[in-house]
Amino acid sequence: MTTFIDLLRHGETEHSSRYCGSTNHPLTPLGWTQMWNAIENKQNKLHQWQHIITSPLARCADFAQALGQQYAIPVKQDARIQEVHFGDWENQSAAQLMETDPDVLSRFWHNPLDNPPPNSEHLLDFQARILSAWHAIQQQFSGQSILLVTHGGVIRIIICHILQYPIECLLEFEVRHAEMKHVSIALEEYPPVKILSDSRI
């Protein structure tokens, strides 16, 4: 028996150049188009999804609800797969931060574990939150096919976990807008065998 979990990042938002984190920006018209294109490119998977689980933030939840309504797929919001909170960097762009403290931003890009944004959610706390949801979803929906509509940081945490990659290097993984990653979890094996495949839109 195998569990299939597709990880879909939200599309473009009105302020995609900023560290939005928990700031609740909606999708742009282009962002909606990106999301529907991502789904249409996966028509063979579309009718296999038995549940959609989404971040409660509008850039994920609005599309997840629309998709669920259109194809009669149950949708559940899970706050644990919401993006990391960037603290003092919330809703600021990298260009703005470079003007005020370029060294701090450079250190964050190099190692976000040891150089977090001021007053932000710590990366280890973020990891614990995401993996708590990840394991719970696997248990609850064992043997089913699930779509997670979520954020770039969440997907990077899951990738690091599957590949056993150091969490401080998670920014090395590119996760573009409306990009989908596929995870297959073979439950016959002990421990379960997890296979990550990449799909670029």
Image: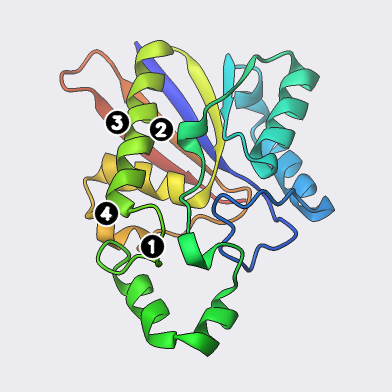
Inter-mark Cα distance, 4 to 1: 9 Å
Q: Which residue is mark 2?
A: 183
Inter-mark Cα distance, 2 to 3: 7 Å
The x, y position of residue 95, in whole percent, is 58, 82
| Kind of residue at disc 4 | Ile
Label disc, if present, on residue 171 of the rendered structure: 1
Q: Residue at x 31, y 73 (%)?
A: 110
Q: Earlier in the sequence, mark 4 or mark 3?
A: 4
Q: Quadrant of residue 137?
A: top left
| Kind of residue at disc 3 | Lys
Dot 3 falls on a residue whose secondary structure is strand
- Is there any visible trace of residue 66 in the rendered image? yes
Q: Residue at x 57, y 35 (%)?
A: 55
Q: Quadrant of residue 68?
A: top right
- Against 23, residue 108 (above or below) is below
Q: Which residue is mark 3?
A: 194
